[in-house]
Amino acid sequence: MGLCDLNTIRDVLGRHGFHFSKSLGQNFLTAQWVPDRIAAECGADRSNAVMEIGPGMGCLTLELSKRAARVVAVELDRALLPVMAETLTGIENVEVVQGDILKTDISALCAEKFDGMAVHACANLPYYITSPVISALIDCRAFESITVMVQKEVAERICAAAGTSEYSAFSIYVQYHTEPEILFEVPRDCFVPQPKVDSAVLRLVPRKMPAVSPQDEALFFAIIRAAFNQRRKTLANAVLAAFGGRLNKAEIFSLIRSVGLDERVRGERLTLSDFAALSDAAAVLLAEKCETAAVSQEMRD
Ligand code: SAM
């Protein structure tokens, strides 16, 4: 019986006195095709390694171990360590590390465990920390690819195009650093306990160079944050508030027009290229006023 079989799950967890924790996002897979397909599509093979986050009982870990040279799985819940000592017994190329992925130096862990091998990240993520984990996996620049199961709406938000209601500052951040793609959807009845939402498996392939090349990355993201913090306002009004009076409304209108946009446009309509052009134009104008550093700093705070 596989580790997704409901009777096996109940039997093993029951014998270990384990109870699911809602606060740790513990929804375990009960459909074997899901870990099979994630393992098949995450890029793992005998020439590389996988870092998994949140192995739970080890159903995905086991499938990854059949394909990758080495798997290191970071699990927060100590109660699952004896469970995996049983379910993953005798699997030589797997190591379970107890820890909180958000407090882990991921680059250092990869350097320590994988000896220079190419590494893929893979996870059925706990819903409560999806965005910070994805950000940490991107920011550490340690992975060839990042394949994660997340709430379906989050996957759609990450891949959303400009002008849609799902498009957000987080979509832009992820699309700036990676090429995101939804691989497949996973209905809620593939988990125990059953969550209230459906899921999707998302693959992020880190870009060698960011999608666009703003002159001042901090200013670029500061403008994006300002635009989406007040997404009901026009871009001009949202940015006016964020510029703290260093640029007046006429100057902001003129900046927006200078990159070929209507001065009444909302921030959510701008593509990454539009935001890069706008932030470059703003950088020039602020440099003329010797204000760039001060504004980037203020908008970051
Ligand atoms: N991989 C298993 C599966 O697919 O059946 C379990 C997935 S479950 C959605 C999420 C797992 O992440 C749980 O095992 C949970 O204990 C673990 N987890 C929660 N927060 C974590 C954290 N901060 N760091 C590492 N693991 C965490």
Image (spheres, rainbow, N blue to C red):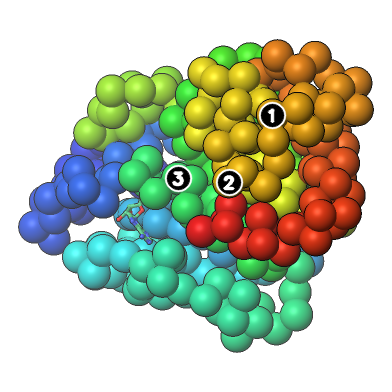
Visible in this render: residue 78?
yes
Identify the amino acid type marked 1.
Lys
Tell me: 249 left or right of 38: right
Q: Earlier in the sequence, mark 3 or mark 1?
A: 3
Q: Determine the residue positioned at 67% across, 47% down.
A: 246
The image position of residue 143, as x and y in percent, is 70, 61
Indicate which disc residue 114 carries.
none
User: Which residue does the numbered mark 2 point to in the structure image?
Assistant: 244
Q: Determine the residue positioned at 42% across, 64% down.
A: 102
Real-space CA distance between mark 2 and mark 3, rounded to the nearest whole angstrom? 32 Å
Contact (CB < 8 A) between labels 2 and 1? Answer: no
Mark 1, Cα crowd under 10 Å, few <14 / some 14-19 / many 20+, is some
The image position of residue 128, as x and y in percent, is 34, 44
Helix, strand or loop at label 3? It is helix
Residue at mark 1: C-beta within 8 A of ligand 1: no
Helix, strand or loop at label 1? It is helix
Contact (CB < 8 A) between labels 3 and 1? Answer: no
Mark 3, Cα crowd under 10 Å, few <14 / some 14-19 / many 20+, is some
User: Which residue does the numbered mark 1 point to in the structure image?
Assistant: 249
Identify the amino acid type marked 3.
Thr
User: Which residue does the numbered mark 3 point to in the structure image?
Assistant: 130
Quadrant in which the N terminus appears: top left
Between 137 and 9, the one lying in front of the other is: 137
Tell me: 263 left or right of 19: right
Between 72 and 84, the one lying in front of the other is: 72
Mark 2, Cα crowd under 10 Å, few <14 / some 14-19 / many 20+, is few
Helix, strand or loop at label 2? It is loop
